[in-house]
Amino acid sequence: MPAVSKGDGMRGLAVFISDIRNCKSKEAEIKRINKELANIRSKFKGDKALDGYSKKKYVCKLLFIFLLGHDIDFGHMEAVNLLSSNKYTEKQIGYLFISVLVNSNSDLIRLINNAIKNDLASRNPTFMNLALHCIANVGSREMAEAFASEIPRILVAGDTMDSVKQSAALCLLRLNRSSPDLVPMGDWTARVVHLLNDQHLGVVTAASSLITTLAQKQPDDFKTSVSLAVTRLSRIVSSASIDLQDYTYYFVAAPWLSVKLLRLLQCYPPPEDAALRGRLTECLETILNKAQEPPKSKKVQHSNAKNAVLFEAISLIIHQDSEPTLLVRACNQLGQFLQHRETNLRYLALESMCTLASSEFSHEAVKTHIETVINALKTERDVSVRQRAVDLLYAMCDRSNAKQIVAEMLSYLETADYSIREEIVLKVAILAEKYAVDYTWYVDTILNLIRIAGDYVSEEVWYRVIQIVINRDDVQGYAAKTVFEALQAPACHENLVKVGGYILGEFGNLIAGDSRSSPLVQFNLLHSKFHLCSVPTRALLLSAYIKFINLFPEVKATIQDVLRSDSQLRNADVEIQQRAVEYLRLSCVASTDILATVLEEMPPFPERESSILAKLKKKKGPGNLPETNDSRRNGKVNGSTEPSEKMESSNQCFPSLFADLLPTNRPRPAPSSSIMPSAGTVVSTHPFTDVLNLNPAPSTGASLLIDVFSETSIEASTEMSEDSFHRFICKNNGVLYENHLLQIGLRSEYRQNLGRMYIFYGNKTSAQLLNFSSSVTSSDALKAQLNVQSKAVDPVIEGGAQVQQIINIECVSDFTDAPALNIQFRCSGTLQNISVKLPVMLNKFFQPTEMTSQDFFQRWKQLGDPRQEVQKIFKAKHPMDKDLTKSKIVGFGVALLDAVDPNNENFVGAGIIHTKNTQVGCLLRLEPNIQAQMYRLTLRTSRDTVSQRLCDLLAEQF
Amino acid sequence: MTMQFMLLFSRQGKLRLQKWYVPLSDKEKKKITRELVQTVLARKPKMCSFLEWRDLKIVYKRYASLYFCCAIEDQDNELITLEIIHRYVELLDKYFGSVCELDIIFNFEKAYFILDEFLLGGEAQETSKKNVLKAIEQADLLQENLDFQMRLFSEPE
């Protein structure tokens, strides 16, 4: 390489850069920059036309100033002028400026695009490349609009120079990523695939990136690339290192291209063609073999390049997950790397083994490295490597090694870096729960977690232990004993106090027989921690105390004293004060029976996904977690080592493995209506009875406890309740109505023109509801359109009990009105009348219909009669969240059609309304306008009444 | 291989080159740069060259007084990225003749041009050292005699 004239002799620029470097302070630098900016501005504004060289120099200075981190708000025009210079370096600087400082000024974009167009048409490869680089660097929508159809043409044209093809391929890739909708697929796709056969390895390299990106989106269109990629790869791996000349990198043949080809193959399943498949397996074997050969060079570049290909090959082997021998060989190779002296390789081996652990063929092989991985956890000096070791231990964990892994993670936690403690806590909590055969071990583990890393134990973790203890009665006594012992420590973490308070409040009676843990001892122990705790914990302890009053009448007086003390009754915190007042009053006025009912043991929690798991997923982001493969691993791998029956039965015996502590706000099962959680008080906005606030209290509805306090009975209103009608338009289940006596829950199912509704009546009082009757009435017009039959219910509902009523519905023709549900009963001598609008709407009889964009618009046009279309423009009543909107539209009953509307922000749906007499096809389109916070909703169906009704119903939802 | 961005910065934390392959606002770019420079400079010499950062993988290597730092996606290959960095250093070295930080400061535009010939849209465009340098050389010659070059290119090579 000859010595080059660096900086093209822009002496002024060099002087300016020197000046900046010599500035002693930030202030001096800013001063110098401002002086220069003023100078440049005056030059640009001056009367004298600047020559190209000066323009280039000043633009370059501006660029330098911008790259230093200062804002630049002028000079764009001069840069655009440089683009049309016929001096290469001027053009080049112009393009660089545009690439770095993209400006959305539309006039400029037009000028820039013009210049690019000229250069693309120039047939001068150097100019064409500059233009293509600029498009690839900016990648804006405007450029995609202008050039997306031109670039494929350049790419596949026979007379295009190789270097231009390379730029065009990657330019197209960038546009496809930023504006995929603007890049047209077409004849060129087949020709692009054939670039994999090109003689020029640079072209193949660039093309393989493009093809990989396109194949990820439309695998079918690029299927033919598989055989070409295998052929190419096979030629590379079997070549002698000198064959590929300059594409050989430190004795490794075309490492970048190899990696890209291996990556492309990961877009597809293993080839079906046996010969091709054999050829690919051969390639992968050759790559694995080469790893065992002595290195051809001692340089780290040699081993890096070689191993880069090896790791990508292993990724492909894991992706295919079909060749047990290859998987085991890969695992052994990674095992060697686990002990390599290069930190980088140890890191990557741990990372790669994580994915290998989820394959049924290699899970066992991965497990054999457990000691090495544990050792890595203890001895690695770099936290990012230790983090990988934690991840791998988590991934390789199963029933056989769970105790060892959890123990090692716990002991590592004592010295772990602060940055990864929370994640380790979550992982330990999940593993301990997932693989617990013996739940005493689980309880011990979680309490250890709190002891070792209490600050990092999030709410989810301690909620979870409580939920599990409540749901499993075989562990409750042990849990009570263990927390009691743990609380003996003079200094214990507040989270332990919370768990202790909750568990003793529920199950303290199980250990109260022992004089060393008598009720009073338990209470004194808890109360000794009280004053050191935060307000929420103290509130929780107060709830534990009221539970004690129920469990142990002998400590009632002691606890009442505590509740009565000024530090509670007159506490500055409203929650504490309120709990103290209410609990004290409750303990004074309520009979033993009422206390026993109100303060009954918590019912089991419903099943849901573990909130801990959800949290870990959120922390790590999707796709980054071994759990994604868990089901497969549990089903197959564990199944191969243990009888599958055992797996199933262990799942059954603890179904809430993935249950969430926080139940949804759905109709409560009967037992829970007898206890506190559903109560909200009139005197406060806080649902005070909900000890942990674990159950979200309904916003309406008076507390059962009100009766205890006030003895007043409220006359039931007889006016029709419509409040919840709209909440059921897009969903089928939920609480329809609730007052202080009665809760009405609803579950409904619809198929075609038929529906069935289950109505649950929950008696919230402890008294009987007598002469209970419920009937459904319809207006005369509605009777002809909708057939409703209800079965009678039992006339008596016991205190705290729930009864069910089934209603069968048939849709005869489209309708607007809704039937009414009329309920009548007697409670404590007072007659109550309740009338609720029954949420049966036309959209319930939707069957979703999937269709292509073409079909959609064809039908849309067919329904073009103005009477068939109803449109509404309205203001958003709720936050304009895309996912929420989607779920509402799906809940409404239509199929949500993706990629139909050219505007990505719009929602399009289709469905068919089934009535006995006819079927009505329906298309809808919802266009949000975020800026205006408005929506436009358009419905098209063959019947005007249907369009109108559906539009009215759906418009309510946003 | 999808590189999201590449940063070059000095031991003192001064940014020497920034190349972004994803659209981000200036504010975001500055924030990312600040955070990453801090994170990388805090690491000890013997630590591994990879780290997880947000949902990206960071691959970095120090050459004399300069840190070269790339952000790649979850599925991407760390080792080959490390060699992308090395190849770029080789290209700079060959072009400037034993490159040092000052070369990149005073000829920053050249550093960008060389990078564009090597990587485009976050992907390797031309991995042959000879071919990249030939392209840059031709460009340098172009500035000497543009008319001559124009005639040269209008004829088939």
Image (tube, helix red, strand yellow):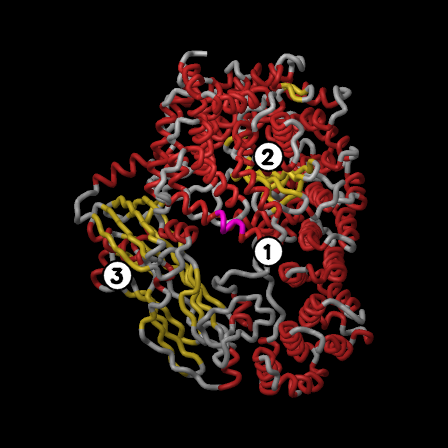
Q: Amino acid at mark 2?
A: Asp
Q: Nearer the viewer, residue B154 or A493?
A: B154
- Give x and y (percent) for residue A316: 61, 28
Callout 3: SS: loop
Q: Nearer the viewer, residue A568 or A383?
A: A383
Tag 3 near tag 2, CB within 8 Å: no
Q: Residues within 10 Å of mark 1 (few under 14, many from 20)?
A: many
Q: Amino acid at mark 3?
A: Asp
Task: Compare marks 3 and 1 and give the one earlier in the sequence.
Answer: 1
Residue A534 among those drawn in magenta: no
Query: What subunit carries mark 2?
Result: B
Q: Are marks 3 and 1 on the same chain?
A: yes
Q: Tell me how far mark 3 sits from mark 2, CA to CA.
A: 58 Å
In the rendering, which numbered label is found on residue A611? 1
- Give x and y (percent) for residue A481: 77, 67
The residue stretch that appears in magenta: A32-36
Q: Amino acid at mark 1?
A: Ser
Point out the frontmost of discs 1 and 2.
2
Q: Nearer the viewer, residue A596 or B96?
A: B96
- Residue drawn where x is 73% and y is 67% of the image: A493
The residue under label 3 is: A817
One can see residue A177 in this view: no
